[in-house]
Image (cartoon, grey):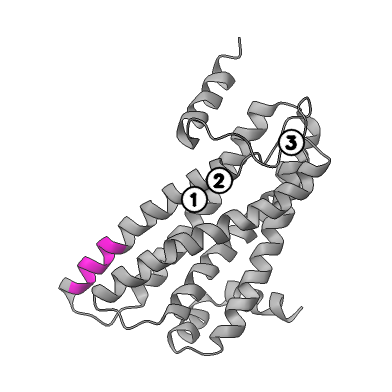
Amino acid sequence: MKYFAILTHFLRDRSQFLEEISKEIRLEKKIIALLICSSTFFAIYGAIMGSFAGGLQILSSAIKLPALYLLTLIICLPTLYFFDIISGSKRTFPQYMALLLASMSIISVMLFGFAPITFFFRISIHDYVFFSLLNIVILAISGFIGINFFYQAMQSFTDQDAEQIKYRTSVVKGWLVLYGFVGSQLGWTLRPFFGEPSQPFELFRTLESNFYLQVLNLIRQALFPY
């Protein structure tokens, strides 16, 4: 429970939490706590997503959703770290890790908050297209909130002159776009998260098309079902 106490402290007093990260106070404990808490919430929401098909898909999605966010972090973090060093930042790798895990925790908490709504529509409307679009919207909203926190946190973590700050801001903005692209395409690679009750269980599907074309296709199916 001490891990969730750290998460609660972060959610209730973000400015103090960020100050502690800036001063490298108990970074290791923060990283472990945020990783465990966010993974737990992601797993719960993933299980609800997988409940659309039921069976093994519930377990699969409960594992794959936390893996999606963690893998995205692992893939993108080195790029941010080295680009930020080039811009003159003196922050350490664990500090960046803690900041990113904090933003992931916000996303996971938001998803956990949306979980009852998602579950309600899961049991009341059995429509694959609707359920897929609903989750995409919820994931997008939660992701935006988490990314916005990370951007604001990075803005507060600076002691550079105006020109360096401008360059660093551009780097962070560019990295956030990259993070979004990597995360969405990685999610497409790790699919299915919902599964289809009429189809046999698949751990992964054959790679085809991309995430963005699939979203457009789902929207088309929702607007023009026949």
Residue 204, located in which quarter of the rendered image? top right
Quadrant location of the N terminus?
bottom right
Residue 32: image location, x then y, percent: 63, 77
Front of the two marks 3 and 2: 2
Identify residue type, mark 3.
Phe
- Callout 2: helix, strand or loop? helix
Labels 1 and 3: the sequence-earlier one: 3
> As displayed, is residue 27 above or below residue 130?
below
Residue 169 belongs to magenta span = yes
- Within 10 Å of disc 3 (Cα), the crowding (few <14, some 14-19, many 20+) is some
Q: In this view, does 119 lie to the left or right of 178?
A: right
Identify residue type, mark 2.
Gly
Q: Distance between the residues labelled 3 and 2?
A: 22 Å
Marker disc for residue 187: 2
Quadrant location of the C terminus?
top right
Identify residue type, mark 1.
Gly
Q: Mark 3 points at which residue?
A: 121
Q: What stretch is highlighted in magenta?
A: 164-171
Residue 101 visible in the shown view:
yes
Q: In this view, does 118 lie to the left or right of 102?
A: right
* Mark 3–mark 2 CB contact (< 8 Å): no
